[in-house]
Each structure stands twice: as structure tokens, then as C-alpha cells.
Amino acid sequence: MKVLIFGQSGSGKTTLCKNIVQRMGDRVVHINADEMREEANDWDFSEPGRWRQFRRMLNKANAVSDSGKIALVDFICPYKSGREQFDADLIIFMSTVVNGKYEDTNKVFEWPHWSEYDFDIHEWDEDDPIDVCWSIGKKIWEDETPTVQMLGRWQPWHEGHQALLDRCLEKAPQVEIMIRTMPWGDNNPFSVHEVEKNLKDKLAYLAGIVSISIVPNIVNITYGRKVGYTIEQEHFEKDIEDISATKIRNNTTD
């Protein structure tokens, strides 16, 4: 998979990429334009020099993608035709800066139409890296892949839930975590959107392997004849089963 993060110098591309790497770990490979130029010892910013740089970045991204990793490509990529040729699976435009510090780049940078990228970041927000992780995840997720469902309130997510998730990932390559919508109360102090935000923060490293969704207040799961899936309860060691979300909430508020 190839993710292109482009925009003017100083727009925050590298900062965003480093934050994504911190969350997704070795699933992603950060390809930085300055590092590639330094490796090639090529600091020619003429049009031919920019196209040489483009080919270096593209070749590296293709090699990373072909290896099964996610190529996180961080460079200005000023030409519209270059962005089209890159054929990225996800394109993010950093529009936080209109003009960068290099006048020659300002002159050649072709501002994209909104239809040329998946989304843009025009003002830095601490949640941006998490949002990008899950946008990458959506591109990876396959509905036809065997999947285990986890249904719960997750008020809040704790080590017992993590142990259950780990067990689920032993059963299938994907897990759908469903957040049950519940009336607010002492046992449900967090809104489903707060729970969703917390889960996306904690589980960003599994984006695309895990999917998170909000569902109604499901009180019964019923099925007729055997249709190819199993409903089962998992059991764990006492120290895991004794973990209480109520105690965690009480300790948090004390």
C-alpha cells in the first residue's frame, strides 16, 4: 500500500508521518524526501532534478509496498502529473502552508483540485495522526476476510478487553469491535463517541486489522439454523477475569 502525503515545505508532512510511525510501528515505512536526496547526494531542484527525485521516491514506495508494508511517502511532489503517476492508495494534502520558504518551489508547485486527494489537513490537530491511521485502515480492511466480532460497552477499555482482542486475533485475521450504545449512567459515563475516540487512540497500531463501529443497544443475538459462524464465551486466568471496569472508573474519579 502507498500513502502519499504532499504539500509545501513546512506544512507538517514529516511531523505527521513521524506521529503515524509512532502509532503503527513497523507496519509502515516512512520515506522522507530530504533523506532520499541526501542518500543520492542529489540537490538539483531544476525540473529534471525534481523528476529524478520523483522517480527515486516512486521506486522506493513501490519496493516497500511490494514487500507487504505500508509506504508512507513524505515529499512536496509539486507536479500534478507526478501525483497522478504515483498511483497512491491514499492521498493526503497538507494545505497548512500556501507558500513555503523556497521561492523556486513556490513557482512550480501546482495547487491541487479537491478531487485529486482523499482529504486535506489545513490546520494541525493532535488527532490528525490517529485519523490518518484509521483512513489507512479503511483501505486495508476487506469485508470478505474472515472476521471475529467483539461486542461490548468498553467503559473504559482495559487489559481484560485487550486480552480478549488478542484471543480473537488468534481465531481470524480481522476483528470488528462494536461499541454498544447504552443510556448514560454510572455504569456508562462515556458517550459512544468518547469510547470510539479512546479505542481509536489505543488501537491505532491495529488499524485495518481491527475495525471499530457504533451499534444500537443490542440485548439479544439470535440465529436460526447453523450458518457458518460460532458464538462463544472466552475464559481467562483469574487475574484477567477479575479486572473490573467499575473499579477502574472509580479509581479514575477518586
Image (cartoon, helix red, strand yellow):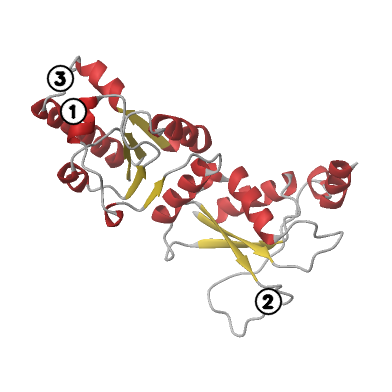
Q: Are marks 3 and 1 in contact (CB under 8 Å)?
A: no
Q: Quadrant of residue 248?
A: top right
The residue that disc 3 covers is: 44
- Residue 171 disc label: none
Under circle 1, the secondary element is helix
Identity of the amino acid at label 1? Answer: Gln
Q: Between tags 1 and 2, which lies in front?
A: 1
Q: Check if mark 2's residue and mark 3's residue have beta carbons within 8 Å.
A: no
Q: Which residue is mark 1?
A: 53
Task: Decide which of tag 2 and tag 3 comes sooner along the chain.
Answer: 3
Tag 2 residue: 221
- The amino acid type of the residue labelled 2 equals Ile
> CA gap, disc 3 to disc 1?
9 Å
Is the residue marked by circle 2 packed among few (<14), some (14-19), or many (20+) residues within 10 Å?
few
Q: Residue furthest top?
A: 41
Taking the image as drawn, is residue 172 in sight?
no
Which residue is at 30% across, 21% downward?
A: 35
Q: Position of residue 88 (x, y in %)?
A: 27, 47
Q: Residue 200, relative to residue 57: is it above or below? A: below
Earlier along the polypeptide chain: callout 3 or callout 1? 3
Relative side of 70 to 165, left or right: left
User: SS at mark 3?
Assistant: loop
Residue 207 in picture, x, y percent from top left: 50, 48
Q: Residue at x 31, y 51 (%)?
A: 117
Residue 94 sits in quarter: top left
* Left or right position of 57 against 195: left
x, y (%) of residue 31?
32, 30
What secondary structure is found at the residue carrying circle 2?
loop
Along the line of sight, which residue is nearer the eye, 243 or 28?
28
Discs 2/3, front = 3
